[in-house]
Amino acid sequence: MTLKKSVLAVLCSVMALSSLPAQAQNYPDRPIKMIMPFAAGGAADVLGRAVTQAMSPDLGQQIYVENRVGAGGALGFAEATKAAPDGYTLVWSSISLPVVAATIPSLNFDPKAYAHISKVAENPFVLVVNSQLPAKSVAELIALAKTKPNGLNFAHNGTGTLTKLILSLFAVNAGIELNEVGYRGDNFSVTDVLAGHVQGMFANSPIALSHMASGTMRGLAVTSPKRSPAAPDVPTMAEAGVANVQAVIWHGISAPAGTPKPIVDKINAAVNKALKNPELIASFEKMGSTAVGGPSDEYQKFVEGELVYWADVAKKTAGK
């Protein structure tokens, strides 16, 4: 009986492996779900919907987006790890993944449990303030904040988010005290900056640029090492006199760990083809984002490195 069970187990394994090429060849034969861990209308959501719409014709199936909001993206990331690794559930991965892994002690999922498919885009944060605030530069904002400790309200997107981490880093490096106000997502926080309920925030550039262009927000600095081509007149944080407040926001597409490589490769090819579309590139640039692309193993190594980097940053800034 033991021999029969062993033979049966081997046969089942061989059959499962032999079916993978057929699965990949037929993939996809039904719509694909993209879990978006962030609010509808936010920067990540806008970018994700644009690229998945561009990918659908090449894959021959619709990619529909489902928003799963909460805990800085952790709820959506967790849901993706529980899905079947068959290519029919994807997740919009981003810099928020290593940040929540580094800042939420009670994380209920393995942040390494993904097959990372492709980086899609990169963009900076923009330090923005309500246009009525009498501060036209970072230096003027710091001077104003020093006259009224905790008197300026600045928004972030909740505990465990990069906006919270960057805001805290800015306050520490600038030697100021700000009243930090948490929100569920940047579409909510931006609304209150526009209304003047809070005076400013570090906003994702795809959201910030349109309001800067209309004059309802004033951009004081970007968090990237270099100036953004979409806002060349806005200095970097380093140029504005505040060092060590730097972050490039990255976005990508991932799947549950164990997704067969032929399926990962097929999705990766669709992503890279979409990112060569001149119209998509132009739309990204208008939002202050740069299309990236590249092979899946490159993105896998990149995310693994980010998990280590942000864990180190969180330790260094603990309690600040």
Image (tube, helix red, strand yellow):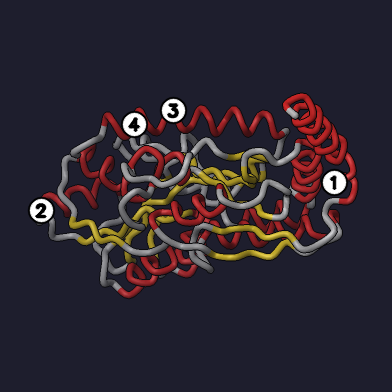
Q: Which mark is residue 23?
A: 1
**For marks 2 and 1 on the same chain, the one whose residue lies earlier in the sequence:** 1
**For marks 4 and 2 on the same chain, the one whose residue lies earlier in the sequence:** 2
Compared to 185, does 84 lie above or below?
above
Residue at 42% in and 62% down? 186
Q: Are marks 1 and 3 in contact (CB under 8 Å)?
A: no
Determine the secondary structure under disc 2. Answer: loop
Eye-nearest disc, 4 or 1: 1
**Residue furthest top in the image:** 3
Q: Which mark is residue 308?
A: 3
- Residue type at the position of mark 4: Val
- Residue 134 is situated, as x and y percent measured from the top left of the image, at 24, 62
Q: How far apart are the alpha carbons under marks 4 and 1?
A: 41 Å
Q: How far apart are the alpha carbons under marks 4 and 2?
A: 26 Å
Residue at 13% in and 56% down? 150
**For marks 4 and 1 on the same chain, the one whose residue lies earlier in the sequence:** 1
Q: How far apart are the alpha carbons under marks 1 and 3?
A: 34 Å
Q: Residue 170 appears in which quarter of the rendering? A: top left
Q: Are marks 2 and 1 in contact (CB under 8 Å)?
A: no
Q: Are marks 4 and 2 in contact (CB under 8 Å)?
A: no
- Residue type at the position of mark 3: Val
Q: Quadrant of the N terminus?
A: top right
Determine the secondary structure under disc 4. Answer: helix
Residue to which mark 2 is pinned: 149
Q: How far apart are the alpha carbons under marks 2 and 1?
A: 61 Å
- Residue 209 is situated, as x and y percent measured from the top left of the image, at 50, 59
